[in-house]
Image: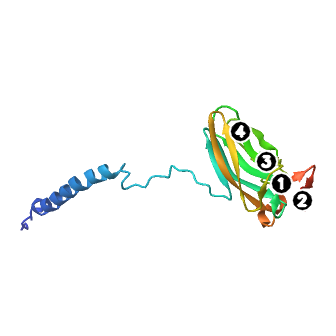
Amino acid sequence: MTTKPRIQTAAIRKPRTARKLVLTAILVPCALLTAGCSFITPLPPTDSINVGNGVGANLGPVKIRNAVMVTAEPNYVTTVSFIFMAINEGDEDATVLFGYNSELGYQTEDIFVPAKSEVTMGFHPDEEQMILTDLDTRAGGILSVYALSGEESDVMPVMVLTGDFEQYADLLPRLDDEVAIVE
């Protein structure tokens, strides 16, 4: 019986093993160093932006979003429906006070926002509206609304829009269940 000479496989595998060890020694530290690195991993934005048709305000745990005013008056505006969403992220109930200048002087309106909830005003035709009256502004203009909740306050430059825009046609101000149209 003749035996074939055995080829030493260990000598052939050594270079492969050495290459694997070198690659592992290089790649593992690189992977560990870059795993939590914010230079390579994009960070989420920290600034809030208004993505809807309106402006907002940050009042501590209370946030005002998508605030706009809608009117039925084509030019000179005295009455608007103030449309917005108030979000209370806090653990305590909050009251938001809105102030604005009118022909009668400084006027205020307020809204109660329970903890961990949101309240919308005027977003839907059958929803409660916050009607601001005795204004002295123009359609297409901007009205400054001062918002206050707790110790936090902000000024919102709110756009005054007309019902000519289809999305706002059924959100016009209602006074005693009638749309307030002044000609």
User: Disc 1 to disc 4, how far (Cα)?
Assistant: 23 Å
Q: Which residue is mark 4?
A: 96
Does the rendering let one see residue 116? no
Looking at numbered disc 4 in the image, what kind of residue is underneath it? Val
SS at mark 2?
Answer: loop
Left/right of residue 9 with respect to residue 148 in the rendered view: left
The mark closer to the camera, 4 or 3, is 3
Give x and y (percent) for residue 72. 84, 60
Q: Which residue is mark 1?
A: 78
Give x and y (percent) for residue 88. 66, 39
The residue drawn where x is 83% and y is 53% is 79
Left/right of residue 75 with respect to residue 180 in the rendered view: left
Q: Which residue is mark 2?
A: 182
SS at mark 1?
Answer: loop
Which residue occupies the foreground of this view, 9 or 100? 100
- Residue 161 versus residue 46 in the image, above or below: below
N-terminal-most mark, 2 or 3: 3
Left/right of residue 54 with respect to residue 37 in the rendered view: right
Looking at numbered disc 2 in the image, what kind of residue is underneath it? Val
Q: Which residue is mark 3?
A: 102
Looking at numbered disc 1 in the image, what kind of residue is underneath it? Thr
The residue drawn where x is 9% and y is 65% is 7
Within 10 angstroms of label 2, few (less than 14), some, or many (20 or more) residues? few
Tag 2 near tag 3, CB within 8 Å? no
User: Disc 2 to disc 3, how far (Cα)?
Assistant: 17 Å
Looking at numbered disc 3 in the image, what kind of residue is underneath it? Ser
